Image (spheres, coloured by chain):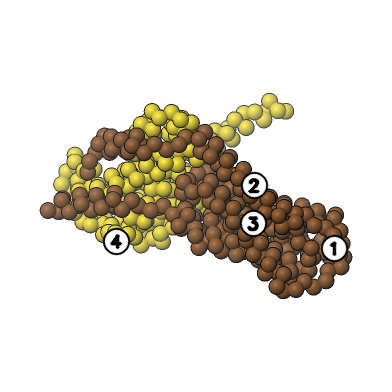
Amino acid sequence: MTGLPDLKARVLAETRRAPAPDRRAVQRRLARTWLVVAIVTLAAFGALGGLRAIERPLPFVLTTAAGWVGVAIAATWGSARRGSMSGRPLSILVAAILLTPPALVAWYVAWVCRVHVSVPVAPIGRAFVCMAICVALATAPFIALATTRRASAPVHPRATAAALGVVACAWASVLMDLHCEHADVWHVCLGHVAPVLIVGLLGFVLGERLFGVHADQSGAASHLEGRAIKSA
Amino acid sequence: MLAALAPAYAALCVRTAAVDGRDNPTRVAADAAMERYAAGDEAAFSRLFDLLAPRLHGYFLRQTRDSDAADDLTQQTLLKIHRARGQFIRGASVTPWAFAIGRRLLIDDIRRRRRDLLAPDHEQAVDRASSEAATADELIAAQETGERIRGALRRLPASQREAFELIKQEGLTFVEAAETLGTTVAAVKLRAHRAYEALRGVLGDVLESQSPRDAHSTDREAKP
């Protein structure tokens, strides 16, 4: 054992050797990151054709999109840190992950039934195109969200990353809903809502890599060395 | 009407602060030091170290029974806090965050090294250090009791054991333990209560003879 004064000297020396940015610097960097993400995502949305409401009535498009914005806000709230550095309890993260896709579908179906929009069946291939676009639109926000949370070491890395994936793709689905002319419920489920699950699953898979806390190999080695010296 | 409600509101605030640990001067000082450090005051990290390191070191020492491992894990936890200083949220509590990072580092270290957690020589070293003034009989009795408690703790489910240790050994509040374990306060209370009930079943005579008042208060606090 080195004793806490020695340990303190070592830790303080390390902090001087590798200084970390303070809150102001981090906030500036994050603001730049989010600005770039917003520009890239909206530019991509614009390049795709932006808002299209030719086949579908504009009030219907805006109402379904407004509901999806509400769902995306709720998912964002569910995965936000809310004053805790360790992140949200697992139950809330799981609720955000599992309830977001059904909530999107439920809102959409409710409005399709209410407004009685004529919905020609969309070709299946178009749903996969929408799926790919949706995942692509969610990529930049997901990276930004992961960057924002990376150093804080959330307690549930996989669930947190999955929730952030769901949040990023829920917002991407809003853009997709504004853009895509197909109002067919199955098309919406496959092309606009399924990507939310896909990106959530991707987050789950990458979670440990993104947010995992791993013991430093050199540190671990040094205490094993210490034990070896002791036993000798 | 409002004036009549003011004392009740003040009492509620005091109670809330007591439940989440905001009335504890050490925790308040640690949060203030972390806040200053996040805002750019480099000197505040030394103060933060003084407030957090002894508790973290004690936690790691109890868990690993290895002072070198405890040193390394304490160092790594504090360096991770240092690296994430810019992301510290205003008004957040640093203690449960530090324990959460420490707990995960510990789990990772155990997985990686597959260390024998309760090597007898280290246990004895810790016991010796903590009871220098005790007589030989007391020392033997304390070691036997300690072994029974450790054995009973080992048999508990991990979730219950962790909740119990964080609250009873590390002195975290239910709110802090919940944040450390990434669960709800109700779940932590339930786990700690179940752990205590299980321990009481196994070690009833020890608990009653040693600290009946403490046992009753824990029982009362732990009820969800």
> SS of the residue at dot 4?
loop
Residue under numbered circle 4: B114
> SS of the residue at dot 1?
loop
**Residue depth check, mark 4 versus mark 1: number of the one nearer the observer:** 1
Question: Is residue A120 positioned above or below A170 on the image?
Answer: below
Q: Label 2 to label 4, Cα distance in Å?
A: 46 Å
Residue under numbered circle 1: A55
Q: Chain A shown in which color? A: brown
Q: Disc 2 residue type?
A: Ala
Q: Measured from the top left, where is residue B133 in percent x and y?
A: 19, 39
Q: Label 1 to label 3, Cα distance in Å?
A: 23 Å
Is B186 placed left or right of B120 in the picture? right
Is A4 placed left or right of A68 in the picture? left
> SS of the residue at dot 3?
helix
**Picture disc at residue A137:** 3
**Residue depth check, mark 2 versus mark 4: number of the one nearer the observer:** 2
Q: Nearer the viewer, residue B1 or A125?
A: A125
